[in-house]
Image (tube, rainbow, N blue to C red):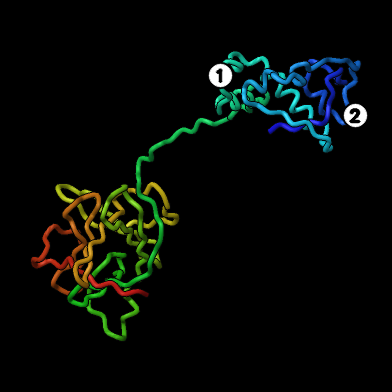
Amino acid sequence: MAMVPEITCDEVDFYRDDDDRQFYEADGPNQKKGYFQYPDLCSKESLLEEDGIQLKFTTQPHQFHQTVMVIVAIEKMKHLNGLSSQFFQDNDLMNIFTNIFQEEPITFKNCDIYESDSSFRLVSSQDCTIQDINQKCLALSKASELRALHLNGRNISQQVIFSMKYLLGDIGSQKTHVVLCIKKNNLYLSCVRRGEKPILQLEQIANFPSINVEKRFIFNKVEINNTTEFESAEYPNWYISTSQMDEQPVFLGNIRGGKDITDFILADF
């Protein structure tokens, strides 16, 4: 229900200007005072009453800008097409607000999405030691070659400590992707092709990238019961392997469950 200060059916003082903002100035508008009349408001069968809108005149004080808003709304309503020929509905109220208030533009920015050449990136790491199921430890030889051999308490310090780095891979992949690094020397295990078959080698890298990791460094970590296999991501069905014999190089093999050992035991360090 609209509430306006008490008025008479005679002339009503008002400030008139083409810019509605003059009504809200602190000192009031500087235009010449004029007069207008609202005969419709005083008529018992006014246009607003016919449309189901009731006006109640009260002597309670209201702020000036509230009164102005009511007058502006009435003026807008009187000029809406078809308002007097139908019942006042929600759409009519929305049209009033649309005519009175100005919508602010919505700004947005265009963003481009790029796909990386490699979807692998590092997310965490774990320090550990690795032994094959015959309890042979992995150690570096003087020629910086990774070998599998039995170590006792006196020379157990020769066993290398690995930093096993976990990666996020392709969306929906169920495999666990890791990178194996010999922590002390920053030597990374990688798989490259030499001749007719892939081989396992060590690459020394001071600053290994955390994103766009090349596939030759990546192994699929497969856990079977209490053992772990490391399958090359670059060359599927090729696994990190050790020989049944002692002090032999660690290599990349494609035989599982045969004479070559592909099952390893990890221990946190």
Would residue 163 be found to the left or right of residue 48 on screen?
left
Residue 151 image offset from top left, x and y in percent: 26, 80
Residue 98 image offset from top left, x and y in percent: 62, 24
Query: Looking at the rendering, which quadrant does residue 59 occupy?
Result: top right
In the rendered view, tell whether residue 228 sits above or below residue 19: below
Q: How far apart are marks 1 and 2 (CA)?
A: 41 Å
The mark lying in front, picked from 1 and 2, is 1
Say which of 24 and 224 sits in front: 24
Q: Which amino acid does label 2 sit on?
A: Asp
Say which of 47 and 153 sits in front: 47
Location of the N terminus (image quadrant): top right
Q: Residue at x 12, y 62 (%)?
A: 256
Crowdedness near tag 1: few (<14), some (14–19) or many (≥20) residues, C-alpha within 10 Å:
few
Q: Which amino acid does label 1 sit on?
A: Gln
Would residue 267 be found to the left or right of residue 98 on screen?
left
Location of the C terminus (image quadrant): bottom left
Would residue 217 be found to the left or right of residue 20 on screen?
left
Tags 1 and 2 touching, CB below 8 Å: no
Residue 159 image offset from top left, x and y in percent: 31, 75
In the rendered view, tell whether residue 73 sits above or below residue 188: above
Say which of 95 and 189 sits in front: 95
| Mark 1 secondary-structure assignment | loop
In the rendered view, tell whether residue 184 sits above or below residue 86: below
Q: Which residue is drawn at 30% across and 56% down?
A: 177
Badge number at residue 27:
2
Would residue 127 be found to the left or right of residue 262 on screen?
right
The residue to which callout 1 is attached is: 86
